[in-house]
Amino acid sequence: MKMVFISKIKWIALFVLMLSMVSLVVHLSITRLSGAYSMQSTLMPFNGFDFTASIFAPQSDRFVRNMKLWGPVMSLKSLQPYANPRSNYPVPAERNNGYIYAKIFGGFEKIRSSICDLVTISRLLNATLVIPEIQESLQSKGISYKFKSFSYLFDEDQFIASLKNDVNIVKSLPENLKAARKRNEVRTYKPKRSASPNFYVKEILPVLKKSKVIGLVLHDGGCLQSILPPSMSEFQRLRCRVAFHALKFRREIQMVGQLMVQRLRASGQPFLAFHPGLVRNILAYHGCAELFQDVHAELIQYRRAQMIKQGILNGELGVDSHIHRDNGSCPLMPEEVGLLLQTMGYPNRTVIYVAGSETFGGQRVLIPLRAMFSNTVDRTRVCTKQELSDLVGPETPLPLNPFQPPPTKSEEQLKEEWNMAGPRPRPLPPPPDRPIYQHEKEGWYGWITESDTEPDPSPVDLRMQAHRLLWDALDYIVSVEADAFFPGFHNDGSEWPDFSSLVMGQRLYESASSITYRPDRRVLAELFNITRDNMYYHLNYSWKLSVREHLNKSLSEDGLIRQSLLSKPTTFLSHPLPECSCRIPSAEVPKQVKGNDGRLLDGGEDECPTWMKHSQEDTHLESAVAEDGSNGNNELEYENDGVEQQESDDNAVKSSLTQLPVDQDDEWDPND
C-alpha cells in the first residue's frame, strides 16, 4: 500500500514537471513574437503609428488604394487653380496716392484673412502697403530677438517679390511719415470686416491723397466685404494670389512642416487631418458650455458673459446648449467624428493627425477618438522637442515658477489661533490643509478656483500665444497636404474666419478633387439624436447608409453649393470659386447653379488656357484606369477594414505651402 502511494506521487510530480515545460515553451514563443513586434516600433521614433500591420501584411493587401476613402472625387477633377489676371491689369506705378500701414489683432486665422484684405485695399486705393504689424508676435510678447512682427510667421522678401506686379510693398514708412506717426498726426481708421469698396473710395481715399498716409486697425479678421461685384473679379483673384502664393511661411516653418508630412506618410499609407475646432471663443459665442463639465463649462460661461458685456454678442448668458447643438451651431465632439469615420469605413489603424494649437478640454476630450483610432497623433508626437525649440528661436528666459504658494504658518501662529478660537469645549482641530500643487495653479484655468475675475495675461501667457501662431502654421501645412480632411467645426456663416474654413478653401483651390469633407452639422445632429442612446454599442445599417450618403454628397457639388451659400459671405478664402479656378473641358458639362441673389453657387468657371490643358492630358488616362479599378468593389470598400490603403505617388498633389521660395521673373505663372 505504501509503495502504491509513493508511485502515485511520482506520477503527479512528473505531470506537474511536464506542464511547467509546456508553459515555459509557450512563454518563450510569445516573448519572441512580441520582440519582433516591438522592434518595428523603433522604425519611426517620432510617433506612435502601428507599423506592424503594414509590414507583416501580405504584399497583395499592402498597396490597395480605397478610392472611396482617399479619392480623388472624379466629378471635381476638371477644376484647376487659375488666379492669374485675365483682363487689362496694369503694373502699379512708383508714384501713387500714399502709404497704408496697419495693425492686426487676433490669432492665425484673422491674421491670414486680414493680410489678404489689406493688399486688396492697397490695390483699390493705388497706395503703397507697409508690411503690417502682427500684434500677437511683437517683441513685447517675449518672442525671439531674431524676428520682427511679420517675419515671425511669414517670409517678408517672398511676400514683396511675389506681389510686385500687383501692389508696391515696403518694410517701413519713410522717415518724415514715421515722425508724423509718432506725433499722432496720422489719421487712423478701424474699418469693419464687412466694409464696402465705396467706403474706401469715398471716405478714406480723399484723406489718403491729402495726408499721404493712413493707418488701419483690424480686429475682426478682415476689412473688406467677402463678396464683391462681378466687375471686381480681378480683386478677388488678387486675394487668391496673396493667400495661396505670396503669403508663404518663413523657411524654417516650411521645412519642419514638410518633414512632418513625410513622417506621417512614412508608414506607406495615407493620412487624414482632423481639426476639432474646440476653441473657447467659438464655444462661448455659440453657447456650447453644457457640452463640457466642471470647470470647463464655467470658463466658457465666463467668456460668454465678457462677450455680451463688450457688445460682441447679442444674446442671453444662459442658453440651452443641446438646442444649439441640434441647430448645428456647436462643433462636433471628437467621439462623434470617430464614429463618423468608422461608419465611412476607415480602418482603426488609419493615421489621424489632430490639428489646432488649442483644443479646449485638453487631451481628455480626445480619449474616445484615440480609443477608436490608435494612430491618432498631433504635433508633439510627430516632431521632437528640439525641432520645435529651434523653430521658436532663442528667447529671453522667464521666471520658471511664477506661482507663489501661500506662506506657511509657524507653530506660534497656530497656537495663537487655537487660543483665540473661542470658549471651550472646542472641536478637534481640522486636519492640515492639503498641499497646493503647482499644476493646479498654472495655465488658463487656475484662476477660476480662487477669483471671479480672469487675470491679465502673464508674460508666459503672452509668449505662449505667440507660439500658438507657429503651431497653427505647422498644422495648416499638414492639413492642406493631408490625403483627407475632416473639420470638427467650420464657420457656416458665423462671425469670424476659422482654421478649418481656410484649410478647406486652399484645398479646394489647389486640388478640388481631394477628399475634403464639408458636413452639415445640423443633419448630423439629427442622425446622432436618433441613435444617441446606443451609438457606442450598435449602429443599424440604415443609419450607416444615411451617414455615408450625407458625407459622400458633401465631397462633391452638393457640398460646394452649401459652402458657397454659408461660408463664402463671411470669408472669401473659404470658397474661392469661380473667380480663382478654371475648368478643363470634360464629357460632363456642369450646370450653373445660382442663388436667390443671382450669385453663382456652382459652375461658371472660365475654360482653362491651352497650356493647362496639355499638362493634364497625360493624367486623364491614369485617373480613368483608377476609377475603373475601384468601381467594382464599391460596397466592399466600406466593409473591408483589414486592407491597408496607400496613395499612389503619381496622383499626389504637391501643395505650394511646402515648396521653398525661388527666384521668379516678370512672367511668373503662379500655377507653374
Image: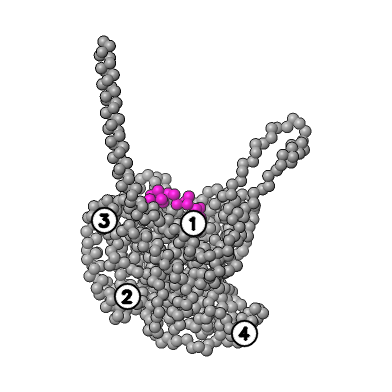
Label 3 near label 1: C-beta < 8 Å? no
Q: Which of marks 1 and 4 is in front?
A: 4
Q: Disc number at residue 359?
A: 1
Q: Nearer the viewer, residue 76 or 274?
A: 274
- The answer to if 576 sits in the magenta stretch is no
Sequence order check, earlier mark of 1 and 3: 3
Q: Is residue 265 above or below residue 112?
A: above
Q: Which residue is drawn at 38% across and 71% down?
A: 659
Q: Is mark 1 on a helix, strand or loop?
A: loop
Looking at the image, can residue 229 be seen? no
Sequence order check, earlier mark of 2 and 1: 1
Span highlighted in magenta in the image: 358-374
Q: Which of marks 2 and 4 is in front?
A: 4
Provide the residue designation for mark 4. 176
Label 1 near label 2: C-beta < 8 Å? no
Q: Nearer the viewer, mark 1 or mark 3?
A: 3
Q: Which residue is drawn at 50% across and 74% down?
A: 115
State the separation of the CA atoms marked 2 and 1.
38 Å
Q: Quadrant of the N terminus?
A: top left
Q: Nearer the viewer, residue 646 or 592?
A: 646
Q: Which of marks 2 and 3 is in front?
A: 3
Provide the residue designation for mark 2. 583
Disc 4 crowd rating (10 Å Cα; few below 14, some 14-19, many 20+) is few
Disc 2 crowd rating (10 Å Cα; few below 14, some 14-19, many 20+) is many
Residue 356 on image: x %, y %: 46, 60
Provide the residue designation for mark 3. 62
